[in-house]
Image (spheres, helix red, strand yellow):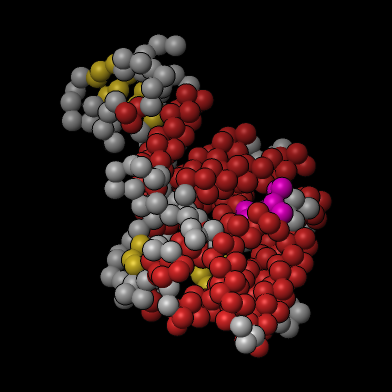
Amino acid sequence: MRALGIQQSNKKRSKHMSNPDRLPAEQMDEGDIVTVESFEQAVDFAAKTFRLRLKKRFTAGEADADVMDYHAPEHSEGVAEEAQEFLRIIQRFDPTLVSDRDIVIAGLQGLAHDLVQKATITPEGMRIRHRGFYPEDITEDDRLRTLGYEKGNEELSADEFVAELARYRYADGTSVFGMDDPATREEYREDIGTTFPKFTPDATLPDGSQGFKVYQPHLTPRSTLRGLALATADLRGEVGGRRTFKSFRKIKNKEYKESNVWVGNELENGIENVGPEMRTKITGSMVDWITKSQVTFPQWQKELLRQSLDENLILKGRTDIQNAIIERYNFEEIIEGSQTFAKGIETQADAVIRAVDKRVGEEFFRNLVEEFEYAT
């Protein structure tokens, strides 16, 4: 393999990398043009660049890293894998609908979709992520609007994604990823935009029950199959593939810990130093998460997956493909498991209320803290 030429954005001359196997970002400034010999080489370097940024920004031990329980680099890796497998299922049924290039791009998008994770920690100790892809995502949400930011994480991540792909060029100057075409750039941005979530606390399910609904308003019937794959992998990856109820529970508990910063702050000096009132508050918060959010999340995602597949203009009427995709998701086990586990927690909580011996409540509190994997 020849050394890769790197064109400096502020100089006429170009330089050669001393080690072509090293990551470009380690040897040049962001924004410099990278001249590559093949599509595969560009993909390899882009993937390594995204992984390096995720590591530096969100991994413990890195300077200035914002370490989070849920939105860790492993989440982005999982989204990339799930999105690619989603597209491979479609390709196996109809190769005309999904190209190998689509699968590769979706993998890169999965790695990049959460490159930016800005957030505000409220005085109450809640982490509020700076979500948003379009301006109205922020301006029409009372809680987000008060935080005072102009661009949301989804938009910033999408911009960073296309900016990175635009760096890669063949020797004749042609963009490897077609980034000189405004329509392609916007399509790739909108794919990542599909991951933007919104929330309805008491939405009504088809069976008449109510529960916490997480949905993606920018996932529309006109979304590309890459966008559909990416949105599905991001929101429903916790119930897909080889997921069990146990693994689902662990993932959702990480999401709780990431959002409820105040709980970690209260527990950081050991549970023996948490006063009775705070123990009651933490217990109530954790019980609500288990018995409400965890129960209705998989129920809603089952409905939303079917809806998104049926409404997508490319997959509409393709029940063979739709059924094959749905079979990949372990909804029934996870729905049943979450309901059973929630009933058990409710029974224990009732026992604590009736108990005379305060040690019953202390044991229940300790078990909850361990369930969410806080240090005791």
Of 5 and 198, nearer the camera is: 198
Q: Residue at x 39, y 63 (%)?
A: 269
Q: Residue at x 47, y 49 (%)?
A: 72
Quadrant the N terminus occupies: top left
- Magenta run includes residue 253: no
- Residue 160 appearing in the image: no
Residue at the limit of the structure toward the left, as seen here: 11
Of 188 and 306, nearer the camera is: 306
Residue 231 position in % (x across, y down): 57, 55
Of 287 and 331, nearer the camera is: 287
* Residue 4 position by quadrant: top left
Q: Is residue 23 left or right of residue 113?
A: left
Q: Residue at x 40, y 36 (%)?
A: 52
**Which stretch did the figure color magenta?**
236-244
* Residue 309 position by quadrant: bottom right
Q: Residue at x 43, y 73 (%)?
A: 274
- Magenta run includes residue 241: yes
